[in-house]
Amino acid sequence: MRSILNFITSISIWGVVFLVPLAFAPWTFEAFEFNKLYILFFLVLIGTLAWFARMVFVDREIRLKRTPLDLPIILFATLVNISSFFSSDRWSSALGYYGRFSDSAAALGSFVGLYFLIVNTVEKPQRLLNWFLGAVGIAIGASYLSLFQVWQQFPVWQIMKQAGFNPVAASLEGLCIFLAAIMAFLAFQSAKPEARVLSRLGYGALTLGGLGILLLADIWQAWVVLLLGLLFALVAGFMVHFRASKRGGMWNLWFPFALLLFAVVFLFSPASVNTSIRMPAVPQEPMLSRELSWSIAWNTATESIKHMLVGSGPGTFAIDFSKYRPAEFNTEGQWQTRFDRLQNHWSEILATTGFLGILSYILLIGFFLLASWLLLLKKNMWPFLVALLAFLVSQFVYYQILSLGLAFWLFLALGVLSWERPVQEFVFSLRKFPEFEIGAKALFLAVALAAGGMSYNAARFYLADTHYLLAQNTGGVNIARSIDQGLEAIRLNPYQAEYKIFVSRSYLSRALGELQKPESARDQNEISRDVQFAIAHAVRATQVSPKRVAVWETLGAVYRDIKLVAGALGWGISSFETAIALEPTNPILHTELGKLYAANEQNDKAKEQFEKAAALKADYVEAQLQLALIFEKEKDVDNAIAKMKDIVIRYPLDMESLFQLGRLQYNNGQVEEAIAQFRQILQLVPAHSNARFALGVALEKQGKVQEAIQEFEKVLELNPGSEAVLRKLQELRK
């Protein structure tokens, strides 16, 4: 029994370090981090239960290795859990959110569990390391096949055919930073005098393979990590040789030194050189600037005493970003992006866990570095120290993903094992104290039952995500089936706001589609039912995640699109007001609120919102356009036309502004000017059916019936079966 339990523990640990960097699945909506977290959580849980069962039921004694890092790690994990409890979104903090599973309390708990499993059970660290490096090698090979589009030639999953695909991370940036930190470790290993020839060749091959990907991707953060990591490797190499009085072996450092020179040259080379090597058509990951990341993190951490102590909660940066999004962000090219992650891991720790959280993390790192410095005579520790320092650098230039988190905690555990001397063993015999043995067995059973309950819910949540993907994929083909799949996802996981938002939008889409039918063919009962369901699910989304702007924006949009329902405009206004309270510097929200005020005949309030939107973003055409249309509602058509002309002068390619100017001119009796505007639009966009229809109406006004008929016929070609166009043609042909 003992050997079986030991095998289960070992295979669980090996499975984590091998599978997490490689794991992805095309059958879940979140293909990468979601699946990596599941593998990490379940294997660590299984390994821990097997280890605990062996001690309680077989050995009948508790054996724990004690190290100087135990208390700092427990302190950090405890503070993260406290932060999760007081979080602005407890669900996201506990289990994660789409794209942000790596910062959850579940992820950290799994990493800490893995750390203690490795420290307490692994007897051959090199074997474990080899499993991890084997996964790295496979990831490198798979990434090359993607970069050179080899996957396109084979019947593989569609996700593998996407540009920049790699199993390590959802982006090429994550892969490169992951490889850069590991390359520093590999370069040091290849320079060790005692390293075997085959080992050196293996380390060198992995290093060169990673270097090739860095060249093809050209991610500057990865070059920074590699550069500083190699500096650490060289310093460590010199220290090893000097301490061993083997200065003649310095020539072994030629490989990391050559890599260092290469990294320096490539990092500071002209852009034309880099561009000539970089692979084309590889998508770039949008990221916040370093300055803005730290600014938002600081504002979040200093918002209140609670935030100063424990932060806003793990995985809640999307909420923090909305709250502290500066107005200056509207001038950037990615101003419409609602970021859910900071530029680096350290600023995220500050924002989400507060000053206590980041201080405890610094304490953890400090204890490791101090203990390592005091034990530098242990040369086996040097490579792990180099790796840890390289991964620490990565945390200052990139946010945390599960592959990076795994590597950090793995090398931390292996570094502790290399200490040898300060690792002491605590032994408590249960045989001598039967009452404690009964308590230990009861505790194990309680933990096992809790693990069973968590596993059941985790399985439900996983199935829910598969249904959500099916719902997404069938939405454009069979909306009824898409809704059914979305509802099944909600049934399996009622705590995920994304599912409810999707279902709400699907019901609304079906209702609006039914409204487009001729009145005689409409099913009013179905429209009414779908509208009610759309509202209900949008409201439930706000109940699940009341601090997330997107859910209130969706609810407001639902009310906006069903404004014929009594009271809908007022509810829509209330929803967008809540969204603006959560994200006050977003001009889109102010504009949408202004539209609802205008529809509700509250012109002064509408104008106020449009002016706020224009002040937040001077080049936001939509706000300017809506401001001009307010003058029309106030019967000041001349001023409306003047404002619209000003917009058209500044933005001559904005089709909506051109169309609205033509419409205003036509309604004001300026038919020739209106015709000129519509013709200008059609020169730019011949398939603009609204402009062509309006041109036909204007030509009819001038008595040019044949020309009008020609335009309406073209509109009918663009919109086959349109009743309005058919009626118009029938009238003109009489």
Image (tube, rainbow, N blue to C red):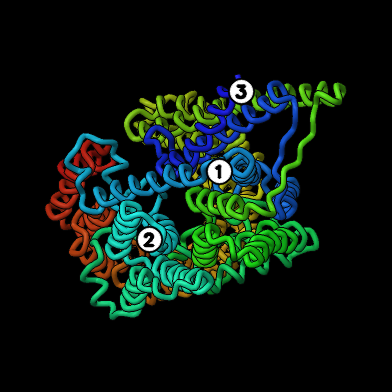
Looking at the image, is mark 1 or mark 2 nearer the viewer?
A: 2
The mark found on residue 2 in the picture is 3
| Residue hosting label 1 | 559
Q: What residue appears at the point 55 percent right and 30 percent down from the top-left corner? A: 461
Residue 286 in view here: no
What secondary structure is marked by label 1?
A: helix
Q: Quadrant of the C terminus?
A: top left
- Amino acid carrying label 3: it is Arg
> Callout 2, which amino acid?
Ser
Image quadrant where residue 521 sits: top left
Q: Earlier in the sequence, mark 2 or mark 3?
A: 3
Please report the residue visible at 51 percent of the width from the left and 45 percent of the height from the top: 125
The circle drawn on residue 190 is 2
Real-space Cα distance between discs 1 and 3? Answer: 63 Å
Q: Earlier in the sequence, mark 1 or mark 3?
A: 3
Give x and y (percent) for residue 559. 55, 43
On screen, residue 701 versus residue 115, left or right, reads: left
Q: For the point 67% across and 25% down, which residue is it?
A: 53
**Position of residue 330 measured from the top left corner of the image (x, y, whole percent):** 49, 70
Q: Quadrant of residue 212?
A: bottom left
Other residues around mark 1 within 10 Å, as few (<14) / some (14–19) / many (≥20): many
Of 115 and 358, the residue lying toward us: 115
Secondary-structure class at tag 3: helix
Q: Is residue 342 above or below residue 493?
A: below
Indicate which disc, 1 or 2, sits on the residue closer to the N terminus.
Answer: 2
Q: Amino acid at mark 1?
A: Tyr
Q: For the residue carrying disc 2, how many other residues have a C-alpha within 10 Å: few (<14), some (14-19), or many (20+)?
A: many
| CA–CA distance in space, label 1 to label 2 | 64 Å
